[in-house]
Amino acid sequence: MAFGGEAVGREPDGRVVFVAGGAPGDVVSARVVEEHRGWLRAELERVIEPGAGRAEAPCRHFREAACGGCQWQQVTWAAQRLAKQEIVARALRRELAAVEPIGSPVPPERWRRRARLRLRSGALGYRAWRSHRLVDVESCLQLEAVLEAALEPIRTVIAARLAGGGEVELLATGRGEVHALVEARGARALAAELAAGACGLAGVILREPDQPDLVVGAAEVDLADDARPFLARADLFAQASSAGNAALRQLVATEARTDGRVLELFAGSGNFTRDLVGAEVVAVEGDTRAAAVGARNAPGARWLGEPVERVLAALAGPWDVLVVDPPRGGFTEGLAEKLATVGAQRIVYVSCDPATLGRDLATLREAGGYKTLRAWPLDLMPQTFHVETVAVLERA
């Protein structure tokens, strides 16, 4: 299986073939739709001989409509975890001889507390695989029950009134509250109806181009994984599952523990920061909305609501620990070289893309003399190709 969702096979002439819907061990008939010098992309026509990694997809939207919300429902859960372990190991092979065994803190279904859906002409759902076609879903096996229950009223009250289309982001708390962002032209016109309690949402952010946000109900909700409150909003990033986030937090907190100085970059709303406070912590987050919420979630840290690249020169070390959780694209050009000069003894790098992680680890080694000690893959999003990785580096 490849990072990106497709199965990887070979033609008799040795060329690699990427086939969506394939599973490990399958022998298939597939129709070529893209041809390149060293590889092909093909559409699955028929499974001639199912492999040991093939499963019966449990969701009819995946089976019948090629719903793109999942990519790996045709793959057994065990084979999914093995594939993710191998994907991370391949991406980091130049930095590590072996990665740690993959962690699986999330059940295969009903794990998603956060979701982004599209709406168009009264339909609400996900895009089909490699298509702009919208798959209307009345149920979704990924969603926690409280999110799934919200789909029908959102379709009836919101999607039906926004013919031009848009997006809805949902966030569920452990107490069963649902917070939402509705981003579409005409969204603000829904305020009166939503204020009357339509959809049963704890709060809704209504967002239109070139207009200030309009908030109906609660502007924030408490997304606490433990006894401490943690403020969150549907329009700010949060890990997709509560159990997965708890496992990720514990791993980062363990590896970043120090009595010294900690610099955290791409700190978001303080998801990791709250566990680092106790040491001297400086948290940097370029999204000023997230940084403002983070300063309330982790008031013991010094917060800078500026892009990392803009403030890094003023944050000269030495730092005992550097914690980084960049976007999927990893470090921007030149950032890894700059980070190698801040004087951190240890780096804890959280990544959602193995390829960009491998690239950045290599740059930190070459530019700063850092050695990758270990890396943990975490399967936080079953039935999809996504995998989180925590890597630990120390200056040689």
Image: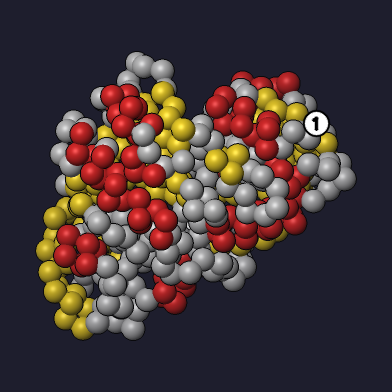
- Residue found at x 71% / y 37%: 298
Q: State whether residue 27 is above or below residue 289.
A: below
Residue at x-position 25% and y-position 45%: 155
Residue drawn at (68%, 58%), measured in percent from left and top? 251
- Work out whether residue 307 or residue 41 is closer to the camera in this orientation and state it: 307
- What's the amino acid at mark 1? Gly
265 relative to 370, above or below: above
- Residue 220 located left or right of residue 78: right
- Kindly identify which residue carries mark 1: 317
Tag 1 secondary structure: loop
Task: Please identify the quarter of the rendering in which residue 7 is found.
Answer: bottom left
Q: Which quadrant would residue 55 be assigned to in this image?
A: bottom left
43 relative to 203, above or below:
below
Residue 207 lies, in percent from the top left, at 36, 26
Q: Quadrant of the N terminus?
A: bottom left
Q: Is residue 209 above or below residue 51?
A: above
Q: Where does residue 311 sit, x and y in percent of width and height?
A: 66, 22
* Residue 114 appears anywhere in the view: yes
